[in-house]
Image (cartoon, rainbow, N blue to C red):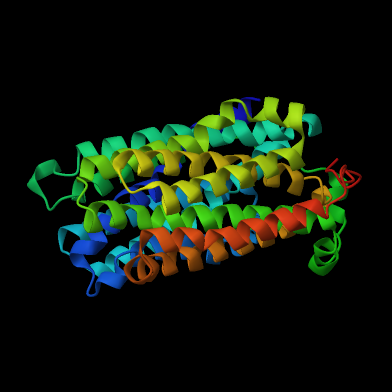
């Protein structure tokens, strides 16, 4: 588990990149965007960077190995954070979008940490490895909004400039931590076999279900979370501190359950865990749409949204790793992340116009059909998906 914990520590620093953007990018965007509807575009660019880089980075890891790729990506993210700081200081909206895009590209690599962790673990410890790495994001969820908020006025620069300067330092630490990572073990036969074409992998019911459930969990979560700071801070007059506390609680809801995820998988199984995530996210939407818009409603709704995402995403990731052979992993993982984060990019892009035109109540209801689609697909999956293709 040594390498799993190295990846966890690295993720604690590296994940601060997108979390800082999601915590403050929308607020900064409302001040520097040329149009109110574009306020969330820096966040969308971050997700677009993740989506567009997912497959190329997975293939790059296949060619160069995971270790040099993750270190190089972290160093690129340092430059991206400094670009964001410069953009905030000079109120340059388009450079902020560019910096967000590059931070997203690094996050495409950070998302691969969970797959790297599985490769360092025994097959029966796959869910534990995934959940352990996600604990790193739990630490980032605590550090990024809190530290970023505390240093937002650093040096007398324009607000939130200091947040991105400090972020650059955190990303540099991530690169240093990753130098201690061993090279990912790859069996000789995995190097020799080409593996099935992607279309053949897509015919696996388990693979399709895992991709769809991961996709839906991210789309619904991102759509609502991206709009939350605008709804709270801009439309309903909550303070920046109150808005940040809700986002922080949401992030804790996303990653704190990872402490218990391996136990939940053993007790309930992957399909029941995904079902629990769907129900929890639906409950979050019902609170937002029909209960109210007081601080407590935002707080409770966003915590439940994060919890539902965790249950769905961890279980979907674990299910995904049972549907391909070791020599097919980069192709299968890369396509999964391309689908998941490409869809998330569209969701975050639509969040700004949706909150402006539909309002908070109606836009939450958009997620209901997607969750019902995931439920329908899950019910069609055999109770015990075959694990014959579990990596050797």
Q: Position of residue 292 (x, y in %)?
A: 36, 48
Q: Quadrant of the N terminus?
A: top right
Q: Residue at x 37, y 42 (%)?
A: 297
Q: Please state the horizontal and vertical placement of residue 100, each as a whole percent of the image.
A: 37, 60
Q: Residue at x 25, y 40 (%)?
A: 242
The answer to which quarter of the image holds residue 376 is: bottom right
Q: Determine the residue located farthest toward the left in the rendered image.
A: 156
For residue 73, above or below residue 357:
above
Residue 61 lies, in percent from the top left, at 64, 54
Q: Nearer the viewer, residue 346 or 88?
A: 346
Outermost residue toward the front in this view: 290
Residue at (63, 47) in percent of width and height: 278
Image height check: is 124 above or below 315?
above
Q: In this rendering, does residue 51 appear at all?
A: yes
Q: Is residue 141 above or below residue 24?
A: above
Is 306 placed left or right of 274 in the picture?
Answer: left
**Residue nearest the viewer, comparing 37 with 108:** 37
Q: Is residue 63 visible?
A: no
Quadrant of the frame with the C terminus: top right
């Amino acid at each position: 588990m040594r390498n799993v914990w190295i990846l966890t520590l690295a993720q604690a620093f590296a994940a601060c990149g997108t979390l800082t953007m999601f915590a403050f990018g929308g607020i900064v965007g409302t001040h520097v965007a040329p149009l109110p509807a574009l306020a969330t575009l820096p966040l969308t660019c971050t997700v677009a960077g993740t989506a567009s880089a997912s497959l190329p980075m997975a293939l790059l890891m296949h060619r160069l190995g995971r270790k040099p790729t993750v270190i190089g990506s972290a160093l690129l993210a340092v430059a991206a954070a400094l670009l964001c700081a410069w953009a905030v200081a000079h109120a340059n909206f388009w450079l902020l979008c560019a910096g967000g895009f590059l931070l997203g590209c690094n996050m495409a690599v950070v998302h691969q940490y969970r797959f790297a962790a599985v490769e360092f673990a025994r097959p029966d410890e796959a869910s534990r490895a995934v959940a352990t790495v996600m604990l790193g994001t739990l630490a980032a969820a605590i550090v990024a909004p809190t530290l970023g908020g505390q240093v937002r006025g650093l040096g007398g620069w324009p607000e939130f400039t200091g947040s991105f300067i400090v972020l650059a330092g955190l990303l540099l630490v991530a690169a240093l931590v990753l130098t201690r990572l061993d090279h990912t073990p790859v069996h000789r036969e995995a190097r020799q076999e080409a593996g099935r074409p992607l279309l053949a992998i897509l015919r696996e019911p388990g693979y399709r279900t895992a991709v769809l459930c991961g996709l839906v969990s991210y789309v619904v979560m991102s759509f609502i979370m991206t709009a939350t700071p605008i709804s709270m801070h801009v439309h309903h007059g909550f303070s920046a501190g109150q808005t940040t506390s809700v986002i922080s609680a949401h992030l804790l809801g996303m990653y704190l359950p990872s402490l218990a995820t391996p136990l939940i998988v053993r007790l309930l199984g992957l399909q029941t865990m995904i079902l629990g995530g769907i129900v929890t996210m639906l409950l979050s939407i019902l609170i937002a749409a029909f209960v109210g818009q007081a601080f407590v409603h935002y707080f409770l709704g966003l915590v439940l949204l994060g919890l539902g995402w965790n249950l769905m995403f961890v279980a979907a990731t674990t299910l995904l790793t049972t549907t391909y052979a070791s020599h097919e992993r980069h192709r299968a993982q890369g396509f999964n992340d391309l689908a998941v984060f490409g869809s998330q990019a569209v969701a975050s892009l639509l969040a700004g116009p949706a909150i402006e035109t539909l309002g908070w109540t109606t836009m939450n209801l958009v997620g209901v059909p997607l969750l019902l689609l995931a439920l329908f697909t899950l019910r069609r999956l055999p109770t015990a998906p075959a694990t014959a293709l579990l990596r050797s």
